[in-house]
Amino acid sequence: MLNKVPEVTIWFWVIKILCTTVGESFADWINMKLGVGLVNTAWIFTAVFVVVLAVQLRLKRYVPFPYWLTVVVVSVTGTLYTDILTDQLNVPLWISSAVFSVLLAVVFGVWWLRERTLSIHSVTTLPRESFYWLAVLVTFALGTATGDWTLELTGWSPGASVLLPLGLIAAISLLWKFGANPVLSFWLAYILTRPLGANIGDWLASPKVAQNPGDPTGLDLGTFTTSLIFLGLILATVVYLTVTRSDVTETYEAAHAAHAADATGDPRKERVALAGFGLLAVATTGLLVWAHSQPHVGPAPEADNTSAVQMAPGQAVKKFPPAKVAALKNLASTSLKDARSGNAKGAHAAAQSLRDLWDADQASLQPLDNTGWTSIDAQMDKVLGTFGIDHSNPPMPPAQQEKELNALLTDMG
Protein backbone atom coordinates (compact mmCIF):
# COMPACT_ATOMS: atom_id res chain seq x y z
CA MET A 1 0.00 0.00 0.00
CA LEU A 2 1.36 3.45 -0.95
CA ASN A 3 1.32 6.33 1.53
CA LYS A 4 -2.31 7.22 2.28
CA VAL A 5 -1.69 10.80 3.47
CA PRO A 6 -0.84 13.74 1.18
CA GLU A 7 2.54 15.44 1.23
CA VAL A 8 2.62 18.37 3.65
CA THR A 9 2.83 21.28 1.25
CA ILE A 10 1.24 24.71 1.48
CA TRP A 11 -1.86 23.20 -0.15
CA PHE A 12 -2.18 20.75 2.74
CA TRP A 13 -2.49 23.57 5.27
CA VAL A 14 -4.75 25.70 3.07
CA ILE A 15 -7.27 22.94 2.53
CA LYS A 16 -7.04 21.81 6.17
CA ILE A 17 -8.03 25.28 7.39
CA LEU A 18 -10.84 25.39 4.81
CA CYS A 19 -12.11 22.05 6.16
CA THR A 20 -12.07 23.25 9.76
CA THR A 21 -14.06 26.35 8.83
CA VAL A 22 -16.67 24.16 7.17
CA GLY A 23 -16.71 21.95 10.26
CA GLU A 24 -17.79 24.91 12.38
CA SER A 25 -20.22 26.69 10.04
CA PHE A 26 -21.85 23.62 8.43
CA ALA A 27 -22.51 21.96 11.80
CA ASP A 28 -24.12 25.18 13.11
CA TRP A 29 -26.25 25.54 9.97
CA ILE A 30 -27.68 22.02 10.14
CA ASN A 31 -28.06 22.02 13.90
CA MET A 32 -29.67 25.43 14.46
CA LYS A 33 -30.76 26.93 11.14
CA LEU A 34 -32.43 23.75 9.85
CA GLY A 35 -33.62 22.84 13.35
CA VAL A 36 -32.28 19.28 13.23
CA GLY A 37 -30.91 19.56 16.75
CA LEU A 38 -27.44 18.95 18.13
CA VAL A 39 -27.76 15.27 19.02
CA ASN A 40 -29.55 14.32 15.80
CA THR A 41 -26.93 16.16 13.75
CA ALA A 42 -24.20 14.25 15.59
CA TRP A 43 -25.87 10.91 14.82
CA ILE A 44 -26.22 11.83 11.15
CA PHE A 45 -22.58 12.81 10.75
CA THR A 46 -21.34 9.84 12.74
CA ALA A 47 -23.09 7.57 10.24
CA VAL A 48 -21.68 9.57 7.30
CA PHE A 49 -18.21 9.43 8.87
CA VAL A 50 -18.37 5.64 9.15
CA VAL A 51 -19.29 5.36 5.47
CA VAL A 52 -16.68 7.75 4.07
CA LEU A 53 -13.97 6.31 6.34
CA ALA A 54 -14.78 2.80 5.13
CA VAL A 55 -14.33 3.98 1.54
CA GLN A 56 -11.06 5.73 2.42
CA LEU A 57 -9.65 2.66 4.21
CA ARG A 58 -10.34 0.41 1.22
CA LEU A 59 -8.13 2.47 -1.08
CA LYS A 60 -4.51 1.42 -1.65
CA ARG A 61 -3.08 4.90 -2.17
CA TYR A 62 -3.82 8.55 -1.48
CA VAL A 63 -6.65 9.90 -3.63
CA PRO A 64 -7.50 13.60 -3.03
CA PHE A 65 -11.30 13.53 -3.20
CA PRO A 66 -12.10 10.70 -0.72
CA TYR A 67 -9.28 11.76 1.59
CA TRP A 68 -10.41 15.39 1.92
CA LEU A 69 -14.07 14.40 2.03
CA THR A 70 -13.19 12.31 5.07
CA VAL A 71 -11.41 15.30 6.63
CA VAL A 72 -14.46 17.54 6.06
CA VAL A 73 -16.80 14.98 7.63
CA VAL A 74 -14.50 14.28 10.58
CA SER A 75 -14.16 18.03 11.19
CA VAL A 76 -17.94 18.34 11.52
CA THR A 77 -18.19 15.18 13.64
CA GLY A 78 -15.41 16.16 16.05
CA THR A 79 -16.96 19.60 16.49
CA LEU A 80 -20.35 18.09 17.30
CA TYR A 81 -18.94 15.70 19.92
CA THR A 82 -17.41 18.59 21.85
CA ASP A 83 -20.58 20.69 21.48
CA ILE A 84 -22.66 17.86 22.94
CA LEU A 85 -20.39 17.67 25.98
CA THR A 86 -20.59 21.44 26.44
CA ASP A 87 -24.17 22.31 25.51
CA GLN A 88 -26.07 19.11 26.30
CA LEU A 89 -24.13 17.56 29.19
CA ASN A 90 -22.84 20.88 30.63
CA VAL A 91 -19.27 19.62 30.88
CA PRO A 92 -16.93 22.60 31.49
CA LEU A 93 -14.65 23.33 28.56
CA TRP A 94 -11.51 23.01 30.67
CA ILE A 95 -12.51 19.45 31.55
CA SER A 96 -13.25 18.63 27.89
CA SER A 97 -9.86 20.08 26.90
CA ALA A 98 -8.09 18.02 29.56
CA VAL A 99 -9.93 14.80 28.66
CA PHE A 100 -9.27 15.13 24.93
CA SER A 101 -5.60 15.99 25.62
CA VAL A 102 -5.20 12.80 27.64
CA LEU A 103 -7.08 10.79 25.02
CA LEU A 104 -4.84 12.15 22.25
CA ALA A 105 -1.74 11.30 24.30
CA VAL A 106 -3.07 7.75 24.71
CA VAL A 107 -3.71 7.42 20.96
CA PHE A 108 -0.19 8.63 20.15
CA GLY A 109 1.29 6.39 22.85
CA VAL A 110 -0.37 3.23 21.58
CA TRP A 111 0.41 4.20 17.98
CA TRP A 112 4.09 4.65 18.85
CA LEU A 113 4.35 1.44 20.87
CA ARG A 114 2.84 -0.57 18.03
CA GLU A 115 4.38 1.13 14.99
CA ARG A 116 7.48 2.94 16.35
CA THR A 117 6.63 6.00 14.27
CA LEU A 118 4.07 8.80 14.25
CA SER A 119 5.20 10.20 10.90
CA ILE A 120 2.47 10.79 8.34
CA HIS A 121 5.00 9.92 5.63
CA SER A 122 4.76 6.25 6.60
CA VAL A 123 0.99 5.69 6.70
CA THR A 124 1.30 2.60 4.52
CA THR A 125 -0.62 -0.03 6.50
CA LEU A 126 -4.20 -0.36 7.72
CA PRO A 127 -3.26 -0.14 11.44
CA ARG A 128 -1.24 3.03 10.86
CA GLU A 129 -4.03 4.62 8.88
CA SER A 130 -6.57 3.66 11.57
CA PHE A 131 -4.40 5.32 14.23
CA TYR A 132 -4.03 8.35 11.97
CA TRP A 133 -7.78 8.90 11.54
CA LEU A 134 -8.45 8.31 15.24
CA ALA A 135 -5.82 10.95 16.06
CA VAL A 136 -7.37 13.34 13.52
CA LEU A 137 -10.83 12.90 15.08
CA VAL A 138 -9.49 13.60 18.58
CA THR A 139 -7.51 16.65 17.38
CA PHE A 140 -10.70 18.17 15.98
CA ALA A 141 -12.55 17.58 19.25
CA LEU A 142 -9.57 18.91 21.24
CA GLY A 143 -9.18 21.94 18.98
CA THR A 144 -12.88 22.73 19.37
CA ALA A 145 -12.72 22.49 23.17
CA THR A 146 -9.54 24.55 23.57
CA GLY A 147 -10.71 27.14 21.03
CA ASP A 148 -14.09 27.60 22.74
CA TRP A 149 -12.40 27.65 26.16
CA THR A 150 -10.13 30.45 24.95
CA LEU A 151 -13.16 32.50 23.87
CA GLU A 152 -14.84 31.80 27.21
CA LEU A 153 -11.76 32.91 29.16
CA THR A 154 -11.05 36.05 27.18
CA GLY A 155 -14.33 37.24 25.70
CA TRP A 156 -12.47 38.00 22.47
CA SER A 157 -14.42 38.42 19.26
CA PRO A 158 -13.90 35.77 16.53
CA GLY A 159 -11.93 38.27 14.44
CA ALA A 160 -9.47 39.01 17.25
CA SER A 161 -9.34 35.34 18.24
CA VAL A 162 -7.92 34.42 14.82
CA LEU A 163 -4.65 36.09 15.78
CA LEU A 164 -3.73 33.71 18.64
CA PRO A 165 -3.73 30.36 16.77
CA LEU A 166 -2.32 32.10 13.69
CA GLY A 167 0.58 33.49 15.74
CA LEU A 168 1.19 30.15 17.43
CA ILE A 169 1.27 28.32 14.08
CA ALA A 170 3.75 30.90 12.77
CA ALA A 171 5.96 30.41 15.84
CA ILE A 172 5.81 26.62 15.47
CA SER A 173 6.78 26.97 11.80
CA LEU A 174 9.82 29.05 12.76
CA LEU A 175 10.88 26.49 15.38
CA TRP A 176 10.44 23.71 12.81
CA LYS A 177 12.63 25.63 10.37
CA PHE A 178 15.20 26.01 13.14
CA GLY A 179 15.31 22.26 13.73
CA ALA A 180 12.39 21.23 15.95
CA ASN A 181 11.13 17.67 15.79
CA PRO A 182 9.04 17.55 12.59
CA VAL A 183 6.44 15.10 13.90
CA LEU A 184 5.81 17.14 17.06
CA SER A 185 5.70 20.36 15.04
CA PHE A 186 3.21 18.88 12.58
CA TRP A 187 0.72 17.66 15.18
CA LEU A 188 0.88 20.87 17.23
CA ALA A 189 0.14 22.93 14.13
CA TYR A 190 -2.55 20.43 13.08
CA ILE A 191 -4.41 20.89 16.39
CA LEU A 192 -4.17 24.70 16.17
CA THR A 193 -5.69 24.81 12.69
CA ARG A 194 -9.02 23.78 14.27
CA PRO A 195 -9.54 26.93 16.42
CA LEU A 196 -8.04 29.02 13.60
CA GLY A 197 -10.54 27.73 11.02
CA ALA A 198 -13.43 27.86 13.49
CA ASN A 199 -12.72 31.49 14.41
CA ILE A 200 -12.55 32.40 10.72
CA GLY A 201 -15.91 30.69 10.18
CA ASP A 202 -17.52 32.46 13.17
CA TRP A 203 -16.10 35.80 12.04
CA LEU A 204 -17.55 35.39 8.53
CA ALA A 205 -20.93 34.04 9.66
CA SER A 206 -21.70 36.18 12.75
CA PRO A 207 -23.88 39.32 12.48
CA LYS A 208 -22.19 42.72 12.35
CA VAL A 209 -24.00 43.85 15.52
CA ALA A 210 -24.33 41.60 18.59
CA GLN A 211 -27.94 40.77 19.40
CA ASN A 212 -27.08 39.97 23.04
CA PRO A 213 -24.11 40.90 25.25
CA GLY A 214 -21.18 38.60 24.54
CA ASP A 215 -22.51 37.35 21.19
CA PRO A 216 -19.86 37.13 18.42
CA THR A 217 -19.77 39.74 15.66
CA GLY A 218 -18.39 39.46 12.15
CA LEU A 219 -19.17 39.97 8.47
CA ASP A 220 -22.76 38.63 8.62
CA LEU A 221 -22.41 36.17 5.72
CA GLY A 222 -24.38 33.53 7.61
CA THR A 223 -23.48 29.89 8.22
CA PHE A 224 -24.98 28.64 4.95
CA THR A 225 -23.16 31.16 2.74
CA THR A 226 -19.90 30.62 4.64
CA SER A 227 -20.22 26.84 4.26
CA LEU A 228 -21.03 27.18 0.56
CA ILE A 229 -18.02 29.43 -0.12
CA PHE A 230 -15.57 27.21 1.68
CA LEU A 231 -16.95 23.97 0.24
CA GLY A 232 -16.48 25.54 -3.20
CA LEU A 233 -12.89 26.48 -2.37
CA ILE A 234 -12.22 22.97 -1.08
CA LEU A 235 -13.65 21.44 -4.25
CA ALA A 236 -11.54 23.72 -6.46
CA THR A 237 -8.39 22.88 -4.50
CA VAL A 238 -9.10 19.15 -4.61
CA VAL A 239 -9.63 19.30 -8.38
CA TYR A 240 -6.30 21.10 -8.75
CA LEU A 241 -4.49 18.52 -6.60
CA THR A 242 -6.14 15.65 -8.48
CA VAL A 243 -4.92 17.02 -11.81
CA THR A 244 -1.40 18.05 -10.74
CA ARG A 245 -0.77 15.26 -8.19
CA SER A 246 1.63 17.70 -6.56
CA ASP A 247 0.77 16.51 -3.06
CA VAL A 248 1.20 12.77 -3.76
CA THR A 249 4.20 11.56 -1.78
CA GLU A 250 5.68 9.56 -4.64
CA THR A 251 5.36 12.53 -7.04
CA TYR A 252 6.91 14.83 -4.46
CA GLU A 253 9.83 12.44 -3.94
CA ALA A 254 10.53 12.44 -7.65
CA ALA A 255 10.93 16.23 -7.56
CA HIS A 256 12.85 16.44 -4.28
CA ALA A 257 15.91 14.59 -3.11
CA ALA A 258 14.44 13.78 0.30
CA HIS A 259 11.66 14.82 2.65
CA ALA A 260 12.80 17.87 4.54
CA ALA A 261 10.29 16.94 7.22
CA ASP A 262 11.75 13.47 7.68
CA ALA A 263 15.41 14.36 7.28
CA THR A 264 17.65 13.36 10.17
CA GLY A 265 17.59 16.26 12.61
CA ASP A 266 20.20 17.77 14.87
CA PRO A 267 19.54 16.50 18.45
CA ARG A 268 20.95 19.72 19.95
CA LYS A 269 18.64 21.90 17.85
CA GLU A 270 15.70 19.66 18.69
CA ARG A 271 16.35 20.16 22.42
CA VAL A 272 16.63 23.93 21.99
CA ALA A 273 13.41 23.97 19.95
CA LEU A 274 11.68 21.85 22.60
CA ALA A 275 12.59 24.51 25.15
CA GLY A 276 11.17 27.04 22.70
CA PHE A 277 7.88 25.12 22.65
CA GLY A 278 7.86 25.26 26.45
CA LEU A 279 8.41 29.02 26.48
CA LEU A 280 5.66 29.39 23.88
CA ALA A 281 3.26 27.46 26.12
CA VAL A 282 4.18 29.59 29.16
CA ALA A 283 3.74 32.82 27.17
CA THR A 284 0.35 31.67 25.83
CA THR A 285 -0.82 30.76 29.33
CA GLY A 286 0.29 34.14 30.63
CA LEU A 287 -1.57 35.92 27.82
CA LEU A 288 -4.79 34.01 28.53
CA VAL A 289 -4.54 34.66 32.27
CA TRP A 290 -4.03 38.37 31.60
CA ALA A 291 -6.93 38.51 29.11
CA HIS A 292 -9.18 36.66 31.55
CA SER A 293 -8.44 39.24 34.26
CA GLN A 294 -9.54 42.12 32.02
CA PRO A 295 -13.19 43.30 32.12
CA HIS A 296 -15.12 41.48 29.44
CA VAL A 297 -18.37 39.74 28.65
CA GLY A 298 -17.92 36.11 27.70
CA PRO A 299 -19.68 34.60 24.68
CA ALA A 300 -23.22 33.42 25.26
CA PRO A 301 -23.56 29.63 25.37
CA GLU A 302 -24.37 28.01 22.06
CA ALA A 303 -27.29 26.06 23.44
CA ASP A 304 -29.45 23.69 21.43
CA ASN A 305 -32.89 25.16 22.05
CA THR A 306 -34.52 23.34 19.16
CA SER A 307 -37.80 21.79 20.22
CA ALA A 308 -38.53 18.32 18.92
CA VAL A 309 -41.96 19.42 17.63
CA GLN A 310 -43.56 22.80 16.94
CA MET A 311 -46.94 22.59 18.69
CA ALA A 312 -50.09 24.71 18.45
CA PRO A 313 -50.84 27.12 21.35
CA GLY A 314 -52.07 25.18 24.37
CA GLN A 315 -51.38 21.79 22.79
CA ALA A 316 -48.13 21.20 24.71
CA VAL A 317 -49.88 21.44 28.13
CA LYS A 318 -53.13 19.73 27.16
CA LYS A 319 -52.35 16.58 29.20
CA PHE A 320 -51.00 18.46 32.23
CA PRO A 321 -53.19 19.15 35.33
CA PRO A 322 -54.94 22.51 34.83
CA ALA A 323 -54.00 23.68 38.34
CA LYS A 324 -50.27 23.21 37.66
CA VAL A 325 -50.52 24.96 34.31
CA ALA A 326 -52.40 27.86 35.93
CA ALA A 327 -49.68 28.24 38.58
CA LEU A 328 -46.97 28.36 35.90
CA LYS A 329 -48.93 30.88 33.82
CA ASN A 330 -49.49 33.05 36.89
CA LEU A 331 -45.75 33.31 37.59
CA ALA A 332 -44.96 33.97 33.91
CA SER A 333 -47.63 36.69 33.81
CA THR A 334 -46.25 38.28 36.99
CA SER A 335 -42.75 38.32 35.53
CA LEU A 336 -44.07 39.82 32.29
CA LYS A 337 -46.02 42.52 34.14
CA ASP A 338 -42.98 43.50 36.22
CA ALA A 339 -40.72 43.55 33.14
CA ARG A 340 -43.13 45.90 31.37
CA SER A 341 -43.36 48.23 34.37
CA GLY A 342 -39.59 48.44 34.76
CA ASN A 343 -39.49 46.37 37.98
CA ALA A 344 -36.40 44.35 36.98
CA LYS A 345 -35.95 42.87 40.47
CA GLY A 346 -39.56 41.68 40.64
CA ALA A 347 -39.45 40.26 37.10
CA HIS A 348 -36.27 38.34 37.92
CA ALA A 349 -37.71 36.99 41.18
CA ALA A 350 -40.89 35.80 39.44
CA ALA A 351 -38.84 34.15 36.69
CA GLN A 352 -36.72 32.43 39.35
CA SER A 353 -39.89 31.12 41.05
CA LEU A 354 -41.16 30.00 37.65
CA ARG A 355 -37.96 28.01 37.11
CA ASP A 356 -38.17 26.45 40.59
CA LEU A 357 -41.80 25.40 40.12
CA TRP A 358 -41.13 24.00 36.63
CA ASP A 359 -38.17 21.95 37.90
CA ALA A 360 -40.17 20.71 40.91
CA ASP A 361 -43.03 19.54 38.65
CA GLN A 362 -40.82 17.82 36.08
CA ALA A 363 -41.13 14.38 37.67
CA SER A 364 -44.93 14.52 37.52
CA LEU A 365 -45.41 16.38 34.21
CA GLN A 366 -42.86 14.80 31.88
CA PRO A 367 -44.29 11.24 32.09
CA LEU A 368 -47.72 12.60 31.11
CA ASP A 369 -46.50 14.01 27.78
CA ASN A 370 -42.77 13.98 27.08
CA THR A 371 -43.20 15.80 23.75
CA GLY A 372 -45.23 18.59 25.31
CA TRP A 373 -42.85 18.88 28.25
CA THR A 374 -39.83 19.10 25.90
CA SER A 375 -41.52 21.83 23.87
CA ILE A 376 -42.31 23.94 26.94
CA ASP A 377 -38.88 23.24 28.47
CA ALA A 378 -37.15 24.59 25.36
CA GLN A 379 -39.11 27.86 25.56
CA MET A 380 -38.66 28.00 29.33
CA ASP A 381 -34.89 27.84 28.81
CA LYS A 382 -35.09 30.82 26.42
CA VAL A 383 -36.98 32.79 29.08
CA LEU A 384 -34.42 31.96 31.76
CA GLY A 385 -31.63 32.91 29.37
CA THR A 386 -33.04 36.45 29.04
CA PHE A 387 -32.77 36.85 32.83
CA GLY A 388 -29.35 35.22 33.08
CA ILE A 389 -30.82 32.42 35.21
CA ASP A 390 -28.87 29.14 34.76
CA HIS A 391 -26.91 30.92 32.00
CA SER A 392 -23.59 32.74 32.18
CA ASN A 393 -24.77 35.83 30.27
CA PRO A 394 -26.00 38.99 32.08
CA PRO A 395 -29.73 39.86 32.00
CA MET A 396 -30.95 40.96 28.57
CA PRO A 397 -33.02 44.07 27.80
CA PRO A 398 -36.67 44.03 29.05
CA ALA A 399 -37.95 43.89 25.47
CA GLN A 400 -36.23 40.54 24.94
CA GLN A 401 -37.58 39.23 28.25
CA GLU A 402 -41.11 40.30 27.31
CA LYS A 403 -40.80 38.61 23.92
CA GLU A 404 -39.82 35.23 25.35
CA LEU A 405 -42.36 35.41 28.21
CA ASN A 406 -45.13 36.18 25.71
CA ALA A 407 -44.02 33.18 23.64
CA LEU A 408 -44.10 30.97 26.73
CA LEU A 409 -47.59 32.15 27.70
CA THR A 410 -48.75 31.51 24.12
CA ASP A 411 -47.35 27.97 24.23
CA MET A 412 -49.21 27.34 27.49
CA GLY A 413 -52.47 28.61 26.00
Image (cartoon, rainbow, N blue to C red):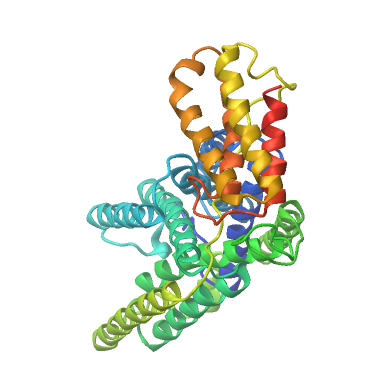
Between 361 and 297, the one nearer to me in the picture: 361
With 265 as the anchor, is 142 left or right in this view?
A: right
Q: Can residue 304 be seen here?
A: no
Q: Locate residue 305: give its quadrant.
A: top right
Where is residue 62? Give x, y as percent. 54, 55
Where is residue 268? Give x, y as percent. 24, 88
Q: How many marks?
A: 0
Rendered-image quadrant of the C terminus? top right
Position of residue 241 relative to residue 85, above or below, is below
Between 271 and 328, the one nearer to me in the picture: 328
Residue at image position (58%, 54%) is 395
Residue at image position (69%, 26%) is 411
Residue at image position (55%, 53%) is 71
With 242 as the anchor, is 110 left or right in this view?
A: left
With 175 as the anchor, is 75 left or right in this view?
A: right
Where is residue 241? Give x, y as percent. 66, 64
Q: Locate residue 146: give its quadrant.
A: bottom left
Position of residue 239 relative to residue 295, above or below, is above
Residue at image position (59%, 75%) is 160
Where is residue 68? Give x, y as percent. 59, 54
Between 299 and 18, the one nearer to me in the picture: 299
Q: Locate residue 407: give its quadrant.
A: top right
Position of residue 241 relative to residue 399, above or below, is below
Q: Can residue 402 be seen here?
A: yes
